[in-house]
Protein backbone atom coordinates (compact mmCIF):
# COMPACT_ATOMS: atom_id res chain seq x y z
CA UNK A 1 0.00 0.00 0.00
CA UNK A 2 1.18 3.50 -0.77
CA UNK A 3 -0.94 6.66 -0.44
CA UNK A 4 -0.68 10.37 0.25
CA UNK A 5 -3.39 12.57 1.79
CA UNK A 6 -4.01 15.71 3.84
CA UNK A 7 -2.90 15.54 7.49
CA UNK A 8 -5.96 17.46 8.77
CA UNK A 9 -8.35 15.03 7.04
CA UNK A 10 -6.44 12.10 8.50
CA UNK A 11 -6.42 13.51 12.06
CA UNK A 12 -10.17 14.16 11.97
CA UNK A 13 -10.95 10.71 10.59
CA UNK A 14 -8.72 8.76 13.00
CA UNK A 15 -9.97 10.79 16.00
CA UNK A 16 -13.61 9.98 15.24
CA UNK A 17 -13.09 6.36 14.21
CA UNK A 18 -10.88 5.67 17.26
CA UNK A 19 -13.85 6.13 19.57
CA UNK A 20 -15.06 2.70 18.44
CA UNK A 21 -11.67 1.08 19.14
CA UNK A 22 -11.19 -1.22 22.14
CA UNK A 23 -8.58 -0.06 24.65
CA UNK A 24 -8.10 -3.52 26.16
CA UNK A 25 -9.12 -6.30 23.80
CA UNK A 26 -8.59 -10.05 23.76
CA UNK A 27 -8.04 -9.68 20.00
CA UNK A 28 -4.99 -7.37 19.56
CA UNK A 29 -6.22 -6.14 16.16
CA UNK A 30 -9.26 -4.54 17.84
CA UNK A 31 -6.93 -2.02 19.50
CA UNK A 32 -6.09 -0.78 16.03
CA UNK A 33 -7.76 0.90 13.08
CA UNK A 34 -8.18 -0.94 9.80
CA UNK A 35 -6.90 1.10 6.84
CA UNK A 36 -7.81 0.19 3.27
CA UNK A 37 -6.47 2.05 0.24
CA UNK A 38 -8.65 1.59 -2.80
CA UNK A 39 -9.58 3.72 -5.82
CA UNK A 40 -9.09 7.35 -4.81
CA UNK A 41 -9.77 7.08 -1.09
CA UNK A 42 -8.53 5.70 2.19
CA UNK A 43 -11.17 3.82 4.20
CA UNK A 44 -10.58 3.84 7.97
CA UNK A 45 -12.52 1.62 10.40
CA UNK A 46 -12.69 1.14 14.15
CA UNK A 47 -14.70 -1.69 15.75
CA UNK A 48 -15.08 -3.05 19.29
CA UNK A 49 -17.52 -5.89 18.42
CA UNK A 50 -20.44 -3.70 19.55
CA UNK A 51 -20.01 -0.43 17.65
CA UNK A 52 -18.17 0.16 14.38
CA UNK A 53 -17.31 3.54 12.86
CA UNK A 54 -16.00 3.86 9.30
CA UNK A 55 -15.16 6.80 7.06
CA UNK A 56 -13.44 7.61 3.77
CA UNK A 57 -10.63 10.13 3.36
CA UNK A 58 -9.77 11.51 -0.07
CA UNK A 59 -6.31 10.25 -1.00
CA UNK A 60 -3.91 9.80 -3.86
CA UNK A 61 -3.53 6.00 -4.05
CA UNK A 62 -0.31 4.88 -5.72
CA UNK A 63 -0.67 1.26 -4.59
CA UNK A 64 -3.76 -0.37 -3.10
CA UNK A 65 -3.61 -2.43 0.07
CA UNK A 66 -4.74 -2.72 3.69
CA UNK A 67 -3.23 -2.92 7.17
CA UNK A 68 -4.14 -2.56 10.84
CA UNK A 69 -2.27 0.08 12.87
CA UNK A 70 -2.38 0.87 16.59
CA UNK A 71 -5.12 3.52 16.86
CA UNK A 72 -3.47 5.46 19.67
CA UNK A 73 0.04 5.46 18.22
CA UNK A 74 -1.14 6.28 14.68
CA UNK A 75 -3.25 9.20 15.93
CA UNK A 76 -0.46 10.54 18.16
CA UNK A 77 1.99 10.44 15.24
CA UNK A 78 -0.31 12.09 12.70
CA UNK A 79 -1.28 14.86 15.14
CA UNK A 80 2.39 15.83 15.58
CA UNK A 81 3.38 15.82 11.93
CA UNK A 82 4.79 19.20 10.78
CA UNK A 83 3.29 19.62 7.31
CA UNK A 84 0.01 19.04 5.50
CA UNK A 85 0.87 16.28 3.00
CA UNK A 86 1.35 12.83 4.57
CA UNK A 87 2.66 9.77 2.74
CA UNK A 88 1.95 6.30 4.10
CA UNK A 89 3.57 3.17 2.68
CA UNK A 90 3.61 -0.44 3.87
CA UNK A 91 5.84 -3.34 2.94
CA UNK A 92 5.44 -7.14 2.94
CA UNK A 93 6.70 -7.38 6.54
CA UNK A 94 3.79 -5.18 7.81
CA UNK A 95 6.17 -2.27 8.47
CA UNK A 96 4.45 1.07 7.82
CA UNK A 97 6.44 4.14 6.78
CA UNK A 98 4.84 7.49 7.59
CA UNK A 99 6.54 10.50 5.99
CA UNK A 100 5.74 14.19 6.30
CA UNK A 101 8.25 16.89 5.36
CA UNK A 102 11.56 15.92 6.97
CA UNK A 103 9.90 13.65 9.56
CA UNK A 104 9.54 9.93 9.02
CA UNK A 105 8.32 7.07 11.21
CA UNK A 106 8.51 3.31 10.86
CA UNK A 107 5.90 1.41 12.87
CA UNK A 108 4.87 -2.23 12.86
CA UNK A 109 1.31 -3.00 11.79
CA UNK A 110 -0.82 -6.15 11.70
CA UNK A 111 -2.36 -8.09 8.85
CA UNK A 112 -5.93 -7.08 8.02
CA UNK A 113 -6.78 -10.80 8.07
CA UNK A 114 -6.69 -10.58 11.88
CA UNK A 115 -9.33 -7.83 11.93
CA UNK A 116 -12.94 -9.04 12.47
CA UNK A 117 -15.43 -8.23 9.74
CA UNK A 118 -17.85 -5.43 10.52
CA UNK A 119 -21.47 -6.66 10.54
CA UNK A 120 -23.44 -6.64 7.32
CA UNK A 121 -27.20 -6.89 7.42
CA UNK A 122 -30.30 -6.79 5.27
CA UNK A 123 -32.04 -3.45 5.54
CA UNK A 124 -35.67 -3.76 6.69
CA UNK A 125 -36.35 -0.04 7.08
CA UNK A 126 -34.73 3.32 6.42
CA UNK A 127 -35.39 6.81 7.79
CA UNK A 128 -34.20 10.22 6.63
CA UNK A 129 -34.03 12.91 9.29
CA UNK A 130 -32.51 16.35 9.70
CA UNK A 131 -29.08 16.17 11.37
CA UNK A 132 -29.73 18.97 13.89
CA UNK A 133 -33.16 17.58 14.77
CA UNK A 134 -31.81 14.09 15.50
CA UNK A 135 -28.97 15.60 17.52
CA UNK A 136 -31.46 17.50 19.69
CA UNK A 137 -33.71 14.45 20.09
CA UNK A 138 -30.85 12.22 21.24
CA UNK A 139 -29.37 14.86 23.54
CA UNK A 140 -32.72 15.50 25.19
CA UNK A 141 -33.32 11.82 26.01
CA UNK A 142 -30.02 9.93 26.32
CA UNK A 143 -29.40 11.32 29.82
CA UNK A 144 -32.23 9.08 31.09
CA UNK A 145 -30.76 5.83 29.67
CA UNK A 146 -29.95 3.31 32.40
CA UNK A 147 -26.38 2.26 33.15
CA UNK A 148 -27.58 -0.83 35.03
CA UNK A 149 -26.59 -3.85 32.93
CA UNK A 150 -28.86 -6.12 35.01
CA UNK A 151 -31.66 -5.01 32.67
CA UNK A 152 -29.90 -4.57 29.30
CA UNK A 153 -33.01 -3.36 27.44
CA UNK A 154 -32.96 -0.09 29.42
CA UNK A 155 -29.33 0.64 28.59
CA UNK A 156 -30.76 1.81 25.27
CA UNK A 157 -33.50 4.10 23.98
CA UNK A 158 -36.67 2.94 22.28
CA UNK A 159 -37.06 4.40 18.77
CA UNK A 160 -40.70 4.17 17.79
CA UNK A 161 -42.02 5.26 14.38
CA UNK A 162 -45.75 5.38 13.85
CA UNK A 163 -48.12 7.67 11.93
CA UNK A 164 -45.24 9.80 10.61
CA UNK A 165 -43.95 10.52 14.13
CA UNK A 166 -40.59 9.42 15.55
CA UNK A 167 -40.46 9.04 19.32
CA UNK A 168 -37.30 8.39 21.31
CA UNK A 169 -37.94 7.06 24.81
CA UNK A 170 -35.33 6.53 27.55
CA UNK A 171 -36.06 5.17 31.02
CA UNK A 172 -33.91 4.05 33.95
CA UNK A 173 -36.45 3.32 36.70
CA UNK A 174 -36.09 6.75 38.33
CA UNK A 175 -36.99 8.99 35.38
CA UNK A 176 -38.18 8.89 31.82
CA UNK A 177 -37.56 11.18 28.83
CA UNK A 178 -39.65 11.21 25.64
CA UNK A 179 -38.97 13.32 22.55
CA UNK A 180 -41.33 13.34 19.55
CA UNK A 181 -41.04 14.87 16.08
CA UNK A 182 -42.72 14.50 12.70
CA UNK A 183 -40.67 12.59 10.14
CA UNK A 184 -41.19 11.76 6.47
CA UNK A 185 -41.71 8.05 7.00
CA UNK A 186 -44.59 5.68 6.44
CA UNK A 187 -42.91 3.03 8.60
CA UNK A 188 -44.53 1.43 11.60
CA UNK A 189 -41.63 0.02 13.56
CA UNK A 190 -39.73 0.10 16.83
CA UNK A 191 -36.22 -0.88 17.95
CA UNK A 192 -33.86 -0.20 20.86
CA UNK A 193 -30.55 1.58 20.20
CA UNK A 194 -27.78 1.28 22.85
CA UNK A 195 -27.05 4.46 24.80
CA UNK A 196 -23.32 4.16 24.00
CA UNK A 197 -24.08 4.11 20.27
CA UNK A 198 -26.24 7.22 20.57
CA UNK A 199 -23.46 9.09 22.38
CA UNK A 200 -21.07 8.32 19.50
CA UNK A 201 -23.68 9.36 16.93
CA UNK A 202 -24.24 12.58 18.90
CA UNK A 203 -20.56 13.53 18.52
CA UNK A 204 -20.78 13.18 14.73
CA UNK A 205 -24.07 14.99 14.20
CA UNK A 206 -23.74 18.64 13.24
CA UNK A 207 -25.81 21.79 13.54
CA UNK A 208 -26.50 21.92 9.82
CA UNK A 209 -29.79 21.25 8.08
CA UNK A 210 -28.57 18.29 6.03
CA UNK A 211 -30.46 15.03 6.22
CA UNK A 212 -28.84 11.84 7.45
CA UNK A 213 -29.98 8.28 6.78
CA UNK A 214 -30.70 5.58 9.33
CA UNK A 215 -30.69 2.01 8.00
CA UNK A 216 -32.45 -0.53 10.21
CA UNK A 217 -32.13 -4.32 10.14
CA UNK A 218 -33.37 -7.16 12.35
CA UNK A 219 -30.42 -6.96 14.76
CA UNK A 220 -28.32 -4.02 13.59
CA UNK A 221 -28.59 -0.35 12.72
CA UNK A 222 -26.40 2.03 10.69
CA UNK A 223 -26.37 5.82 11.02
CA UNK A 224 -25.00 7.38 7.82
CA UNK A 225 -23.70 10.84 8.78
CA UNK A 226 -21.87 12.74 6.04
CA UNK A 227 -18.78 10.62 5.24
CA UNK A 228 -19.18 8.47 8.39
CA UNK A 229 -21.09 5.26 9.01
CA UNK A 230 -21.82 4.13 12.57
CA UNK A 231 -22.96 0.52 12.76
CA UNK A 232 -24.25 -1.00 15.96
CA UNK A 233 -26.13 -3.99 17.25
CA UNK A 234 -29.65 -3.34 18.49
CA UNK A 235 -30.73 -4.43 21.98
CA UNK A 236 -33.19 -7.30 21.93
CA UNK A 237 -36.01 -7.69 24.42
CA UNK A 238 -39.32 -6.15 25.48
CA UNK A 239 -39.31 -2.46 26.35
CA UNK A 240 -41.65 -1.16 29.03
CA UNK A 241 -45.14 -0.02 27.97
CA UNK A 242 -44.09 3.55 28.68
CA UNK A 243 -47.49 5.08 27.90
CA UNK A 244 -49.03 3.32 30.90
CA UNK A 245 -46.55 5.03 33.25
CA UNK A 246 -47.65 8.56 32.29
CA UNK A 247 -50.17 9.85 34.86
CA UNK A 248 -53.59 10.35 33.29
CA UNK A 249 -54.88 13.03 35.68
CA UNK A 250 -53.57 16.49 36.58
CA UNK A 251 -54.38 17.47 40.19
CA UNK A 252 -51.81 20.28 40.38
CA UNK A 253 -50.21 22.23 37.54
CA UNK A 254 -48.14 25.34 37.00
CA UNK A 255 -46.20 27.11 34.26
CA UNK A 256 -42.78 28.31 35.35
CA UNK A 257 -39.70 29.94 33.86
CA UNK A 258 -37.27 27.06 33.26
CA UNK A 259 -34.14 29.01 34.23
CA UNK A 260 -35.76 30.21 37.46
CA UNK A 261 -36.60 26.64 38.51
CA UNK A 262 -33.12 25.38 37.55
CA UNK A 263 -31.43 28.15 39.57
CA UNK A 264 -33.51 27.37 42.66
CA UNK A 265 -32.85 23.61 42.51
CA UNK A 266 -29.13 24.33 41.96
CA UNK A 267 -29.10 26.46 45.12
CA UNK A 268 -30.58 23.54 47.08
CA UNK A 269 -28.08 21.17 45.46
CA UNK A 270 -25.10 22.93 47.06
CA UNK A 271 -25.77 20.92 50.23
CA UNK A 272 -25.45 17.63 48.35
CA UNK A 273 -22.32 15.84 47.13
CA UNK A 274 -21.29 12.40 45.89
CA UNK A 275 -21.21 11.22 49.51
CA UNK A 276 -24.24 13.17 50.78
CA UNK A 277 -27.54 12.78 48.96
CA UNK A 278 -30.60 14.40 50.48
CA UNK A 279 -33.82 14.99 48.54
CA UNK A 280 -35.04 18.45 47.70
CA UNK A 281 -38.34 19.06 49.49
CA UNK A 282 -40.77 21.06 47.39
CA UNK A 283 -44.12 22.45 48.58
CA UNK A 284 -46.51 23.74 45.92
CA UNK A 285 -49.17 25.91 47.51
CA UNK A 286 -51.40 28.63 45.98
CA UNK A 287 -49.01 31.21 44.49
CA UNK A 288 -45.60 29.95 45.55
CA UNK A 289 -43.18 27.05 45.57
CA UNK A 290 -41.19 26.54 48.77
CA UNK A 291 -38.00 24.56 48.21
CA UNK A 292 -35.77 23.24 50.99
CA UNK A 293 -32.93 20.80 51.45
CA UNK A 294 -31.47 19.53 54.71
CA UNK A 295 -28.31 17.44 54.85
CA UNK A 296 -25.48 16.67 57.26
CA UNK A 297 -23.74 19.93 56.27
CA UNK A 298 -26.68 22.29 56.76
CA UNK A 299 -30.02 23.51 55.49
CA UNK A 300 -31.23 25.71 52.60
CA UNK A 301 -34.57 27.31 51.79
CA UNK A 302 -35.91 29.19 48.77
CA UNK A 303 -39.27 30.55 47.62
CA UNK A 304 -40.48 31.07 44.04
CA UNK A 305 -43.61 33.13 43.43
CA UNK A 306 -45.68 31.52 40.65
CA UNK A 307 -49.42 30.91 40.10
CA UNK A 308 -50.40 27.31 40.92
CA UNK A 309 -53.66 25.68 39.78
CA UNK A 310 -55.17 22.85 41.78
CA UNK A 311 -54.37 21.08 45.03
CA UNK A 312 -51.51 21.91 47.39
CA UNK A 313 -48.85 19.21 47.44
CA UNK A 314 -45.51 18.55 49.11
CA UNK A 315 -43.13 16.31 47.22
CA UNK A 316 -39.46 15.29 47.31
CA UNK A 317 -37.11 14.60 44.42
CA UNK A 318 -33.50 13.80 43.56
CA UNK A 319 -31.88 17.13 42.66
CA UNK A 320 -29.73 15.70 39.85
CA UNK A 321 -32.63 13.94 38.14
CA UNK A 322 -34.76 17.08 38.26
CA UNK A 323 -31.93 19.30 36.96
CA UNK A 324 -31.18 16.99 34.02
CA UNK A 325 -34.85 16.93 33.07
CA UNK A 326 -35.15 20.73 33.21
CA UNK A 327 -31.85 21.45 31.43
CA UNK A 328 -32.83 19.26 28.50
CA UNK A 329 -36.18 20.94 27.81
CA UNK A 330 -34.66 23.72 25.64
CA UNK A 331 -37.70 25.95 26.28
CA UNK A 332 -37.98 29.21 28.23
CA UNK A 333 -41.02 27.96 30.13
CA UNK A 334 -42.25 24.51 31.14
CA UNK A 335 -45.45 23.09 32.56
CA UNK A 336 -45.04 20.99 35.71
CA UNK A 337 -47.88 18.57 36.51
CA UNK A 338 -48.33 16.79 39.85
CA UNK A 339 -50.73 14.12 41.12
CA UNK A 340 -49.93 13.94 44.81
CA UNK A 341 -46.74 13.32 46.84
CA UNK A 342 -45.99 9.80 45.55
CA UNK A 343 -47.00 10.16 41.89
CA UNK A 344 -44.35 10.96 39.23
CA UNK A 345 -43.53 14.61 38.48
CA UNK A 346 -44.32 15.41 34.84
CA UNK A 347 -42.46 18.14 32.94
CA UNK A 348 -43.75 19.07 29.49
CA UNK A 349 -44.00 22.01 27.08
CA UNK A 350 -46.52 24.76 27.73
CA UNK A 351 -47.94 24.00 24.26
CA UNK A 352 -47.69 20.84 22.19
CA UNK A 353 -46.15 17.49 23.08
CA UNK A 354 -42.64 17.58 21.61
CA UNK A 355 -41.13 16.36 24.89
CA UNK A 356 -42.18 14.82 28.18
CA UNK A 357 -39.99 14.13 31.19
CA UNK A 358 -40.96 12.17 34.28
CA UNK A 359 -39.10 12.21 37.59
CA UNK A 360 -40.07 9.64 40.22
CA UNK A 361 -40.47 11.33 43.63
CA UNK A 362 -38.50 10.47 46.77
CA UNK A 363 -40.52 9.64 49.89
CA UNK A 364 -39.99 12.35 52.48
CA UNK A 365 -39.42 11.72 56.17
CA UNK A 366 -41.71 13.76 58.41
CA UNK A 367 -39.91 16.63 60.04
CA UNK A 368 -40.54 16.84 63.74
Image (cartoon, helix red, strand yellow):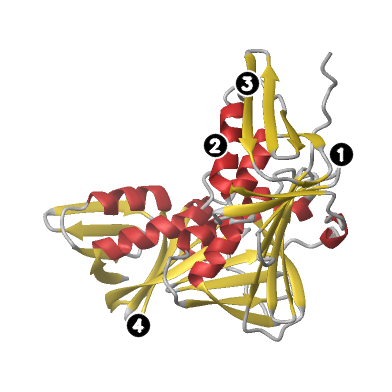
The residue that label 3 is drawn on is 300
Residue 72 percent across, percent down from the top left: 40, 48
Question: In which image quadrant can residue 69 be found?
Answer: bottom left
Task: Evaluate if marks 2 and 1 touch, with contact meaning CB atoms under 8 Å apart.
Answer: no
Residue 270 percent across, percent down from the top left: 57, 24
Which is nearer the eye, 201 or 292? 292
Q: Is residue 193 visible?
A: yes
Task: Evaluate if marks 1 and 3 touch, with contact meaning CB atoms under 8 Å apart.
Answer: no
The residue that label 1 is drawn on is 342
Image point (48%, 58%), residue name: 203
Q: Is residue 238 visible?
A: no
Distance between mark 2 and mark 4 Cα atoms:
56 Å
Image point (61%, 34%), residue name: 265
- The residue tagged with tag 3: helix, strand or loop? strand
Residue 170 percent across, percent down from the top left: 71, 55
The quadrant of the rendering that contains the C terminus is top right
Q: Closer to the N terminus: mark 2 or mark 3? A: 2
The residue that label 4 is drawn on is 39
- The residue tagged with tag 4: helix, strand or loop? loop
- The residue tagged with tag 2: helix, strand or loop? helix
Residue 67 percent across, percent down from the top left: 41, 64
User: Residue 263, which numbered label?
Assistant: 2
Which is nearer the eye, 122 or 352? 352
- The residue tagged with tag 1: helix, strand or loop? loop
Q: Mark 1 or 3, which is nearer the eye?
A: 3
Distance between mark 3 and mark 4 Cα atoms:
66 Å
Which is nearer the eye, 136 or 216? 136
Q: Mark 1 or 4, which is nearer the eye?
A: 1
| Few, some or many residues within 10 Å of mark 4 (<14, 14–19, 20+) | few
Image point (47%, 65%), residue name: 205
In the picture as drawn, the residue positioned furthest to the bottom comes out as: 186
Distance between mark 2 and mark 1 Cα atoms:
24 Å
Amino acid sequence: MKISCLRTDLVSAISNVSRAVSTKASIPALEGVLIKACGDSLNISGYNLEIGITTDVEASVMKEGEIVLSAKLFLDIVRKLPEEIVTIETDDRMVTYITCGKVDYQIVGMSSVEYPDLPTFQETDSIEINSKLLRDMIRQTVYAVSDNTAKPIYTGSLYEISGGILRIVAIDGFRMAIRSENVSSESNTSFVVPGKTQLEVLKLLSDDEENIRILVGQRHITFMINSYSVISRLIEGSFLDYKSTIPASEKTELVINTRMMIDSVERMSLLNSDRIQSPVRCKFNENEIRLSCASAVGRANDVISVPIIGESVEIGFNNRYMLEALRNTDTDEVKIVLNGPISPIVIKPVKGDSFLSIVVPVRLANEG
